[in-house]
Each structure stands twice: as C-alpha cells, then as structure tokens.
Image (spheres, rainbow, N blue to C red):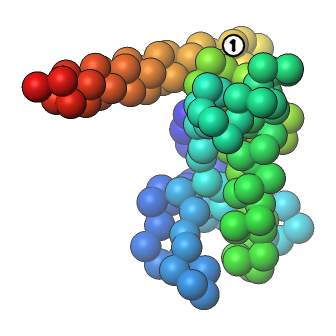
Amino acid sequence: MHLIPASIPVLKELSGISAHDGRRPDGCTLIPWRANRCLAWDVTVPGILAKRYVNLTSKECDLAAARAADEKMKKYGNALPSMEFLPICIEVLGPMDPNTLKFLKAICKMISVRSGDSRELFFATNHISCLLQRFLRVCVLENIQLNADMCN
C-alpha cells in the first residue's frame, strides 16, 4: 500500500535512519505524522503454524500478529526516539494486529477524503490479500524445492 494517495511522502528501506545499534525500520514518513514526529514502521508477517505461535493461533485468530507487534515494539520502540514507531503485523491468512488495522483505517480514510471514493479500505484490504497470496505461493514453492533437494 502506498501512502502517496494520502499525500504522505515516505522512504522505504532506510539507509540514513538507524538506531544506535544498526537496527532500522522498513520505512518512515518524510513529514511529521503526529506530535511533530515522523512515523517509522516495520512489517512482519507471522506464520500462524510456526512453533512459536501455534499455541496462540490454535485458540484465537490475530494473536500471532499481536505477539509479533509486541516483539517489534521491544526491538524498535525506544531505538528511534525521534520517531513514532508502528509495527505493521499481518498474519499470513489475513488477521491483523489491532494497531495495524487502526492505522490502515486511518490511512484509507485520508485517501477517501482526497479521492472521494469511500471504498478505499476495501481496495487496500483486497491488495493486502493479494500480496499475502503471492507471499504464500513463494513460501510453498520454496518448501517443495527444499524437500525435493533433501530427498535427492
């Protein structure tokens, strides 16, 4: 999803903005987002069948995304003091961390105001769904190849 339709210029895969220990988020806004601070984010797509999440995801959806968001906050929360940090966490089958969903709704509302189209949230979630399907396809194909290599 691009933030340009909401008139928010961004940088992706930053090279100039780093935490003191070299960690860097996936992107940031070039203008202040809130409270005179730019917004930085890091995207995670947790696999709901991964050993570290399966005890959570077998009980309730979106808990892997929530756990991943907590882990990202521990990693980046205080590492970039001049920026507001938002972990973007979406499980491989679609459920999102509540803060990710809140952010997505806010961005889509901004885009809707500019475009005049109230369906922006639908378009964004559809686009995210397509990206997740592509991601899963790559993961499945890589695992098939890995298993084939192990059998030979």
Q: Residue 142 falls in which quadrant of the image?
A: top left
Q: Position of residue 149 (x, y in %)?
A: 16, 29
Furthest toward the front, the residue is 151
Q: Position of residue 17 (x, y in %)?
A: 54, 76
Q: Position of residue 123 (x, y in %)?
A: 62, 15
Q: Position of residue 117 (x, y in %)?
A: 71, 15
Q: Residue 86 falls in which quadrant of the image?
A: bottom right
Quarter in which the N terminus is drawn: top right
Image position of 71 with respect to 100: above or below: below
Residue at the spot 77% in from the left edge and 65% down from the top edge = 74
Q: Is residue 17 left or right of residue 106?
A: left
Residue at the spot 65% in from the left edge and 55% down from the top edge = 41
Q: Secondary structure beneath disc 1?
A: helix
Quarter in which the C terminus is drawn: top left
Q: Which residue is mark 1?
A: 122
Residue at the spot 80% in from the left edge and 40% down from the top edge = 66
In this rendered view, identify the residue nearer to me: 53 or 78.
53
Q: Please name the amino acid that badge 1 sits on.
A: Phe
10 Å crowding of disc 1: few (<14), some (14-19), many (20+): few
Q: Is residue 77 left or right of residue 120?
A: right
* Residue 112 in sight in this render: no
Q: Is residue 80 left or right of residue 131?
A: right
Residue at the spot 76% in from the left edge and 14% down from the top edge = 118
Image position of 45 with respect to 124: above or below: below
Q: Is residue 7 left or right of residue 109?
A: left
* Residue 123 in sight in this render: yes
In this rendered view, identify the residue nearer to me: 112 or 123.
123
Image position of 90 with respect to 117: above or below: below
Furthest toward the left, the residue is 152
